[in-house]
Image (cartoon, rainbow, N blue to C red):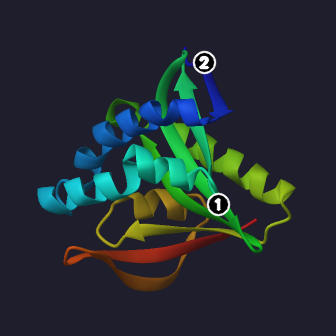
């Protein structure tokens, strides 16, 4: 029996976010990105300095299952939208509906903030696109973002009206 909870993360929770990121990135991106790009991006987005800076504008939420942290999300309000920057769950929790629950929570936040839509980027080769489409997201545009070190993020920008 699952007993889940979603709590807003605090700075002292950085290590939980970092641990989940480290455990989810290779299963998620191993067939899409090189190991070099994976290491570069993990450092760029999940180093203590980077996450501390992100906490200035972003809100992070930790998802626990039976008191064990198994996932997290990171969002930012930009104008009339909520930008979903990050949502990851440990591989062994895939298919349990936790991602759907977290998205529903983000929809509630967006509604409370009077936002018009939620937007996210997803790698064009990531099968998560299907998950987002099932939850009402649609491809809005394609972007290619140079993130440094000759690495690129080749993404779909997806949106869901609130």
Q: Which class describes the residues within 10 Å of circle 2: few (<14), some (14-19), or many (20+)?
A: few
Closer to the camera, 95 or 58?
58
**Which x, y percent locates residue 161?**
72, 70
89 relative position to 73: left or right: left
Q: Earlier in the sequence, mark 1 or mark 2?
A: 2
Residue 96: tell me if it is visible: no
Q: Residue furthest left?
A: 35
Q: Is residue 56 above or below residue 19?
A: below
What's the residue at 27%, 75% (across, down)? 148
Residue 27: tell me if it is visible: yes
Quadrant holding the N terminus: top right
Q: CA distance from mark 1 to mark 2?
A: 27 Å
Q: Which residue is mark 2?
A: 3
Q: Which residue is mark 1?
A: 76
Q: Secondary structure at mark 2?
A: loop
Q: Residue furthest front?
A: 49
Closer to the camera, 160 or 75?
75
Q: How many marks?
A: 2
Q: Quadrant of residue 62?
A: top right
**Which x, y percent locates residue 85?**
52, 60
69 relative position to 145: left or right: right
147 relative position to 101: left or right: left
Q: Secondary structure at mark 1?
A: strand
């Amino acid at each position: 029996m699952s007993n889940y909870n979603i709590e807003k993360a605090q700075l002292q929770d950085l290590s939980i976010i970092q641990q989940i990121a480290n455990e989810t990135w290779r299963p998620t991106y191993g067939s899409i990105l090189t190991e070099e790009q994976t290491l570069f991006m993990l450092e760029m987005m999940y180093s203590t300095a980077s996450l501390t800076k992100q906490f200035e504008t972003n809100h992070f939420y930790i998802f626990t299952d039976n008191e064990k942290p198994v996932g997290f999300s990171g969002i930012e309000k930009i104008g009339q939208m909520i930008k979903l920057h990050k949502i990851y769950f440990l591989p062994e929790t895939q298919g349990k509906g936790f991602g759907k629950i977290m998205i529903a929570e983000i929809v509630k936040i967006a509604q409370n903030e009077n936002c018009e839509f939620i937007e996210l980027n997803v790698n064009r080769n990531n099968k998560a696109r299907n998950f987002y489409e099932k939850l009402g997201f649609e491809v809005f545009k394609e972007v290619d973002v140079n993130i440094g070190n000759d690495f690129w993020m080749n993404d779909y920008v997806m949106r869901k009206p609130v």
